[in-house]
Amino acid sequence: MPSPYSETVGPMVIGVDTSGSIDQQQINEFLGEVQGITNDTPPERIHLLYWDTEIAAEETYEQGDYTTLTQSTRPAGGGGTDPDCVKRYVDAMTTKPEIVLMLSDGCIWGDFPDFNVPTIWGMTTDNTAPNATNIRIN
């Protein structure tokens, strides 16, 4: 039966914090969250960004690539923590993502950016970002 509800998600940007305060266990937890998303509601495309004060690595995955994502991905980074680099990336995109998911410990320099698209911050601390949905990752 036709309905306005859709179980598909368009393009998605996922920003994984790889700053110096993030260890390998946290990166693995973040990638577990990404894998869960691709299993539950696979987006049309994922722009996976590893960031610290700049985008340290960018990977693009299509729906057929999701089963090997956690084995093929190459996290990079290790500097400070400035999520504005992800905002600049999103602002420069010709096709805007349907959603931005930021995975971080929430210990950032400056303010949390407003991406001007629906945004979720998954954080391992109790920090909260304005203009976003905040989820605590345990």
Image (spheres, rainbow, N blue to C red):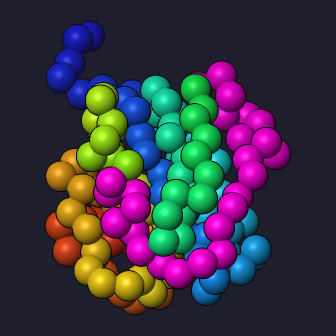
* Numbered circles on residues, count: 0
Classify residue 19 as left or right of residue 93: right
> What span is in magenta?
63-88
**24 vs 135, nearest the viewer:** 24
Q: In this view, does 24 lie above or below 15?
A: below
**56 vs 40, nearest the viewer:** 56
Q: Is residue 47 above or below residue 51?
A: above
Give the residue drawn at x 18%, y 67%.
Answer: 131
Residue 84 within the segment the image draws in magenta = yes
Q: Which residue is farthest right?
A: 71
Q: Is residue 51 above or below residue 57?
A: below
Q: In this view, does 7 lie above or below 16?
A: above
Return the x and y of residue 102 as percentages of the image width and height: 43, 62
**67 vs 13, nearest the viewer:** 13
Residue 65 figure quarter:
top right
Return the x and y of residue 82 as percentages of the image width and height: 42, 74
Location of the C terminus by quadrant is bottom right
Q: From where the camera sits, is residue 61 visible?
A: yes
Give the residue drawn at x 63%, y 83%.
Answer: 20
Give the residue drawn at x 74%, y 76%.
Answer: 25
Location of the N terminus by quadrant is top left
Q: From where the camera sits, is residue 7 visible?
A: no
Return the x and y of residue 34 as percentages of the image width and height: 58, 51
Give the residue drawn at x 39%, y 68%.
Answer: 83
Classify residue 18 as left or right of residue 15: right
Residue 129 within the segment the image draws in magenta = no
Return the x and y of residue 110 as percentages of the image width and height: 30, 84
